Amino acid sequence: MSKPVTIIMIEDDEGHARLIERNIRRSGVNNEIIPFTNGTDAVNYLFGKDSTGLDHKGEALLILLDLNLPDMTGIDILKRVKENEFLKCAPVVVLTTTDDAQEIKRCYELGCNVYITKPVNYESFANAIRQLGLFFSVIQVPQAST
Amino acid sequence: MTADAARRRALWQILLLLAGLLVLAAISAASVILVNQARDDSRWVVHTVEVQNQISNLLLEIRRTESATRAYLLSSGPQFLSEYETSAAAILPAVDRLVALANDNPAQVANTVKLRAAVEQRLAEFARGIDRIKNNDIQSSIDILRRGGANQAVQDIANITRAMRAEEGRLFVERTRTADQSQQWASWVTVAGSGLVVLLAALSIFLVRRSSNARDEAEARLRDSNIDLEAAVEERTADLREANDELQRFSYIVSHDLRSPLVNIMGFTSELEELRGDIFRRIATLANADPVVPDVNGELPEPALPEQDKQLSADFTEALGFIKSSIGKMDRLISAILNLTREGRREFKPVKIDTRELIEGIASTVAHQAAETETQIRIEPLPDIESDRLAMEQIFGNLIDNALKYLKPGVPGDILVKGRTKMGFAIFEIIDNGRGIDPRDHQRIFDLFRRAGTQDKPGQGIGLAHVRALVRRMGGTMSVSSELGNGSNFTVTLPARWTGHNRDKQT
């Protein structure tokens, strides 16, 4: 691992973002977390000015993705990420409120690596995020293909 | 066209028909009367002619007698005497006949009386003349002839018969005119009657034509309105379906988006709870004069709080508890709505269902609860049905669950499931001896999030709303009859063979 993993958090609800970040930190993960509160900014960052994703060549990314975004659906972002030659290896964790079976199936079909439903119960929520953090601390993330 | 107008028109036609009949009858009667009158009139004309004829006959006989008398006077031939006798004998009967014929007219009667007298006088003169010839007194007879070319009797006869002829002539003219008039009347009546009948016929034809036109028009309008109605129903159905879909999407989105802030509220409330622990621990540490020393296990004991701070801490905990329990409740409601809308979007597949087996399956899953409450579940023979299996399970599962849940305290439960078929529908009844439902709440219990009676059992008020939605989707209806304290009877009516179309989705 030449470069530490960067966590891209795409989450429109700042409260959620804060809770997620707090719990990830509590689990002892200190990687850089770059938050985005809307789809457009996230897409601009991920794919760069030329929309190719060339900017992140050689970087190790991990994407935390919410599906209900104000300007686009997370599924569109997921699809684009998995279709992009530089980003397709980046693990995508879908973290959303939807527990609709259709939606879950669709996300996995598009190549999402983990799908987590945010529980309203905070203990479960915190627990889930902390375990996710533990998972992050052991997961091997490939560098974007060169 | 209103029904009133139609009735009036029918009445008009009947009246017209009646009028036509009356006119025909009147014409017939008038014709009979007029023909009779004409015949009478003709008879009278003939009668007049007969009277005139008789007068001529009489005059002829008198002339024959006269000429026979004169011939006898000239030749004294016995054949003239016998001629005289036969013609003289014919005169009086001729007068009698004339009298008989003319006795209808008082004037003529008077004339005939005078005529008879004159004729008798003349006959006497003839007889006297014949006698004179027989006595060879021819000369005096010739003298008489020469003298009295015009004796009184001859004059009288001539005058009277002229008067009678004149009278009969007048009568003839009069009677002919009457007869003509009668005939004219008859023809007038016939023509007028025929005209009237033709008019009435034309009028009825016109009316019939008009009413048949009106009927055709009404039929056309009916057809049009039927088509319109169908189109309207289709349009309305499409609108309803769209509205329903819209509502489904709406409730899905709402319940979904409501969850997001709930996660925050719950999350930060929990964070606050953590903070509360930290804060009060610090307060306790600061308030305590004695330093906190680790116990035997090396852990720090929970420092004791001063009395007023304990109260504060309790208030804090209470407030957080209310917030958390409310959030929990809201989360359950949102989940319920989500489940309902998901049910609404699920595709139903009609399959053959052994209803008895299905309900026995439900009964076995609740057997434990039933045993706890000493409840027996009785299942009578049930009609099989073609419908969605999961929906059927949910419907009967909910109803039996409810029956078990709301028993009358202290009374062993008795739940009866029975069914029958009627006109292509299967009717199921779930009857219990539980606490019952106040009739005022019968509508309410089917509403979402509404419950009735004593609120001593957990629940969201969703079951029956869900059951009714399912029953409706499968083209059925459901109702309840119950009284407080006397058990409930839920009736579910479903199409025996549901083909997947319900009242909302015709396509």
Image (tube, rainbow, N blue to C red):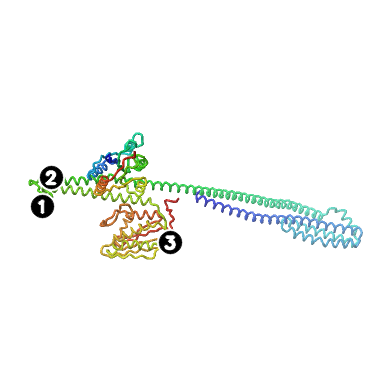
Q: Say left or right for B204 vs B279.
A: right
Q: Please identify the residue farthest to the top as the structure is shown.
A: A49
* Amino acid tagged 1: Val
Q: Earlier in the sequence, mark 1 or mark 3?
A: 1
Instruction: Write down the residue under mark 3.
Output: B422
Mark 2 surroundings within 10 Å by alpha-carbon count, few (fewer than 14), some (14 through 19), many (20 or more): some
* Amino acid tagged 3: Lys
Q: Say left or right for B170 vs B277.
A: right
Residue B399 image-quadrant placement: bottom left
Whether A124 is drawn above or below B66: the answer is above
Q: Chain of mark 2?
A: B
Q: Are marks 1 and 2 on the same chain?
A: yes
Residue B391 pos. (x, y %):
37, 56
Q: CA distance from mark 1 to mark 2?
A: 24 Å
State the SS at label 2: helix
Q: CA distance from mark 1 to mark 3?
A: 81 Å
**Count of residue discs:** 3
- For the residues carrying marks 1 and 2, which lies nearer the camera in this image? 1
Q: Please identify the residue farthest to the left as the structure is shown.
A: B290
Instruction: Write down the residue under mark 1.
Output: B296
Instruction: Write down the residue under mark 2.
Output: B283
Q: Are marks 1 and 3 on the same chain?
A: yes
Residue B273 pos. (x, y %):
19, 47
Q: Nearer the viewer, residue B309 or B238?
A: B309
